[in-house]
Image (cartoon, helix red, strand yellow):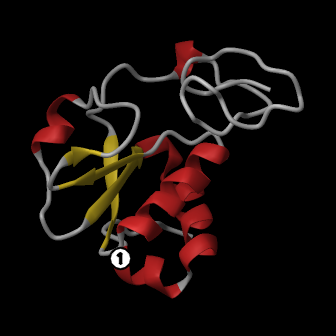
Amino acid sequence: MFCPNCRYEYLETVTVCPDCNERLVSQLRDKSKESDSYDDWVRLALLSSMQHSKVVVEALHSNDIPAVLLSDNGPCTHNCQMGSVSEELTSDGFMVLVPSEFVGEADQIAGSVLGEEWEQAKLYDVEP
């Protein structure tokens, strides 16, 4: 098992990284394929509940999908180096952002977690 944040390897019996408090994944994504820029991140949804927002972001992280939660207090995740995205905050709720290449998969996962609430909160039309 691996931590998607610090990339350390752990025994199969460990499910959460003791350093980062991130849920471990069975495989790490190839870092060379990851973008160093957040210019291609998409504002996927604006949710009114912090609890529901965190549940969505945790579900995305557990599926090895990079995701960031923004609120009027700034980024609410371990990855706070958001560049220009962090300057566009909202006081209306909690905004979920993902890289553009993960939009479809993230939408399906979040929809399965929140159902109709997700559909109403979406800011981005995902083509079926």
Give the class, few, some or many, for how many residues have Cα within 10 Å of label 1's Cα (few <14, many ≥20): some
Query: Residue at image x 31%, y 24%?
Result: 37
Foreground of the two, 28 or 124: 28
- Against 122, residue 75 (above or below) is above
Say left or right for 23 vs 101: right
Locate residue 7, reporting x and y percent: 63, 17
Quarter of the image where the C terminus is located: bottom right
Query: Which residue occupies the extreme front position in the image?
Result: 18
Give how far across and how far down residue 89 sits, in percent.
Answer: 14, 52
Q: How many numbered discs, if any?
A: 1
Place of residue 70 in the rendered image (x, y in percent of width and height, measured from the top left): 27, 51
Task: Check the image and name the residue furthest to the bottom.
Answer: 116
Residue for point 37% across, 19% down: 36
Residue corresponding to mark 1: 121
Furthest residue in direction right, as rendered: 12
Going by the numbered disc 1, the residue's amino acid type is Ala
> Could you tell me residue 122's position as x and y percent?
37, 72
Image quarter for residue 78?
Answer: top left
Position of 104 with respect to 123 (left or right) is: right
Residue occupying the point 88% across, 32% down: 13
Against 96, residue 121 (above or below) is: below
Residue 71: name its quadrant. Answer: bottom left
In this picture, residue 2 sits left or right of residue 58: right
Q: Is residue 46 left or right of residue 91?
A: right
Q: Is 73 placed above or below 13 here?
A: below
Quadrant in the picture for the N terminus: top right
The local secondary structure at tag 1 comes to: helix
